[in-house]
Image (tube, rainbow, N blue to C red):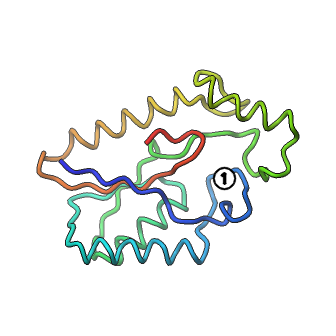
């Protein structure tokens, strides 16, 4: 089995250095990045048997654009591939965090079992991602080629 894991394209929050929330859309550059990726996949002759995406718009929009380029229709939205939840920090610009907020936020990278108020720990996210990943692998033949569109960041584990 071949699994291709792709991070969503550039989002508006990436430009503004904002800690992403669930509704962050792609930027114009992000849409072009996704289109270019899809065109490159098409040129390489890679054919996917299934496409999965996080349900967050920046990932699902990336998946839709890629799939439009390669002529693939059925994207499976999977909430377990979402980025980690950092509720107390969501929507805040990284540059606007106080020294204390940044230190606490950064400490969650080291203390993988701790979580921000209203959020989830890195360990919880890893368990969620791992469960979904293995379920995808178990539900397809060994000869399959699968695309997963997700996230990369503080909480992302793949």
* Residue designated by label 1: 20
Q: Nearer the viewer, residue 51 or 16?
A: 16
- State which quarter of the image contains the C terminus: top left
Whole-percent x and y of residue 35?
Answer: 42, 77
Q: Secondary structure at mark 1?
A: loop
Horizontal arrangement in the rendering, residue 149 relative to residue 87 (left or right)? left
Whole-percent x and y of residue 68?
Answer: 36, 76
Total number of numbered labels?
1
Q: Nearer the viewer, residue 15 or 56?
A: 15
Which residue is drawn at the image coordinates 31% and 58% (left, top)?
Answer: 51
Whole-percent x and y of residue 63?
Answer: 41, 65
Relative to 121, residue 50 above or below: below
Whole-percent x and y of residue 16?
Answer: 74, 63
Which residue is drawn at the image coordinates 57% and 65% (left, top)?
Answer: 10
Within 10 angstroms of label 1, few (less than 14), some, or many (20 or more) residues? many
**In which quarter of the view is residue 112 placed?**
top right
Horizontal arrangement in the rendering, residue 122 relative to residue 72 (left or right)? right
Q: Nearer the viewer, residue 53 or 35?
A: 35
**In which quarter of the view is residue 81 placed?**
top left
């Amino acid at each position: 089995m071949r699994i291709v894991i792709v991070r969503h394209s550039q989002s508006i929050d990436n430009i503004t250095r904002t800690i992403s929330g669930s509704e962050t859309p792609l930027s114009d550059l992000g849409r072009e990045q996704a289109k270019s990726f899809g065109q490159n996949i098409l040129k390489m002759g890679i054919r996917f048997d299934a496409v999965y995406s996080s349900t967050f718009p920046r990932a699902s929009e990336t998946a839709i654009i890629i799939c439009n380029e390669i002529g693939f229709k059925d994207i499976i939205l999977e909430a377990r591939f979402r980025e980690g939840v950092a509720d107390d920090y969501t929507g805040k610009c990284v540059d606007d965090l106080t020294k204390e907020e940044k230190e606490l936020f950064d400490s969650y990278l080291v203390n993988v079992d701790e979580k921000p108020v209203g959020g989830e720990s890195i360990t919880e996210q890893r368990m969620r991602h791992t469960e979904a990943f293995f379920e995808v692998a178990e539900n397809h033949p060994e000869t399959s080629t699968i695309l997963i569109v997700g996230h990369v960041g503080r909480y992302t584990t793949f």
